[in-house]
Amino acid sequence: MSKERLYLFDTTLRDGAQTTGVDFSVEDKRRIAAVLDELGVDYVEGGFPGANATDTQFLGEPSLLKTAKLTAFGMIKRAGRSVSNDPGLQAVLASRAQAICLVTKSWDYHVRVALGISNEENLLALEQSVKAVVETGREALIDCEHFFDGYKGNRDYALAVARTAYEAGARWVVLCDTNGGTLPHEVERIVGEVAKVVPGAHLGIHTHNDTENAVANSLMAVRAGCRHVQGTLNGIGERCGNANLTSIIPTLLLKSEFADRFETGVTPERLRTLTHASRVLDEILNRNPDRHAPYVGESAFATKAGIHASAIVKEPQTYEHIAPEAVGNQRRLLVSKQGGRSSILASIERLGIPIGKDDSRVTKLLEEVKQREAAGYSYEAAEASFELLARRMLESVPRYFSVDSFRVMVERRHNARGKLVTVSEAIVKVFVNGDNEPLWSVGEGNGPVNALDRALRKDLGRYQKHIDGVELVDYKVRILTGGTEAVTRVLVESHDTLTGNRWFTVGVSPNIIDASFEALLDSINYKLMKDNAQAA
């Protein structure tokens, strides 16, 4: 039996750009569009030409997409104006997009209050706008804004809007839950009714996540007849975000209820680029990926409980709903005091360290981990520190350098302008392995840890080339015990700007500077080890 085709419409570059703090450049848009094209979506909505210079430039360029249709967004013409005399619509029509998506009011309340026109005038403007797009030889899509609220307020008028768009020649009539307040059972019921007026092969769904139901609403719409799904990568969007295509796509491909009935432009091979696509967007936005995101998060296939880890080692399906490799992710068996030999063995195997399961060193490593966690260490988030510990106990890690001493000074003083400022300065004395003369480095920073980090990475002699691209991007402190002599845990995230790799290290001490320095040392030693730096 042949499968029905579902079409995926990504609106990251338009709806996603409305996210607080997000501002795409033209180059950002080109890069994200290429990633989406590689993933296999059918439409990439590039922006609103005429609304800003970035969107106008991006959509004024010839499309470089291989399979996806570059789509421009705009509004239907204003009532009382001709198509040729509407600057906004003309700017959209002048773009070099291969498809055009126009938004229209489908809630009579908005027609009356926001537009100040009659229902009939709105329908006429919609009809003329769709025909204007079709006349250019491009696909016309209509976003029926506030459709579900409009349907509940005035069913007949909402249906009239959908019917008018379809009969005027729209390829897709998209039902929008603009305020994000509709629930899944409502979506299924309403879409089923609309499908009696507009064929499902021409119906789309566009949901927002204000009740945390955007993904569920999209899937229910597909069940009810929609064959076009809109959303954004990682679910970004205004307010609480849009439907998350990063969750919707693998659900459609990997869950039998949908996979047995439908196919998309995302093949199993392309699906394996999903995690990469998610991370590329986060990198462009300069934000940390959501560790707990379904399918693509770092913790999506992570297990720390001993009995769970033991079962996963024997048969992954016992605690995994899909194979992580299917979406380009990977399994992680976390090392913690809640784990056991199975977790340790699985972690050692993942690191590629050859060792038998009955080797006594496994037990010693497990006991060492438990003792350290009792003292305040936590390795489930600091995998780089665990790898260093494991390799030091089971193999050998070269001693690249040693820190003879360090000093950190914090001084509050008046600067040359008479302003009271606080200055942090660190001095580090390092011996590089094989050298008799010490290296002295001085660093200044906006705090003692920042100064210490800069001083440590300022000069490591022959190893400097390995750490030039390393930067500290996150620093977390947790106080483990009360009082002024409290034990402190520091977690450091490092980033290699040359390769894009990130890793986490941990340090523990009653002295916050000592704990920070331990984590910083682990970070540098880890980078040198992964680079196979040669020790003297």
Image (cartoon, helix red, strand yellow):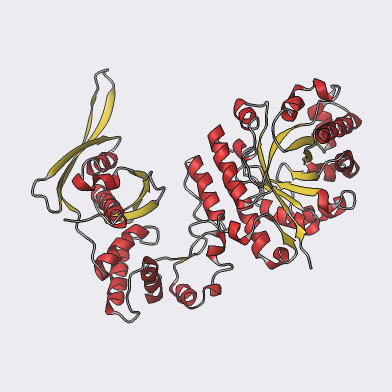
Question: Which residue is at a point 59% across and 29% down the rendered structure image?
Answer: 54
Q: Residue furthest top?
A: 417
x, y percent for residue 154: 87, 42
> Could you say which is closer to the camera, residue 423 or residue 206?
206
> Could you say which is closer to the camera, residue 177 or residue 96?
96
Q: Residue furthest left?
A: 436
| Image position of 522 (left or right of 239) | left
Question: Which residue is at a point 40% across and 75% down the rendered structure image?
Answer: 342
| Image position of 81 (left or right of 47) | right
x, y percent for residue 138: 78, 37
Regarding residue 270, the answer to whether it shows in the image is yes
Please identify the quadrant where the C terminus is shown. Answer: bottom left
Query: How many labels, in total?
Result: 0
> Could you say which is closer to the camera, residue 527 or residue 57?
57
| Image position of 441 (left or right of 70) | left
Regarding residue 376, the answer to whether it shows in the image is no
Q: Quadrant of residue 102?
A: top right
Question: Which residue is at a point 40% across and 51% down the rendered structure image?
Answer: 501
x, y percent for residue 237: 62, 41
> Could you say which is closer to the camera, residue 108 or residue 309?
309
Please identify the quadrant where the N terminus is shown. Answer: bottom right
x, y percent for residue 155: 88, 44
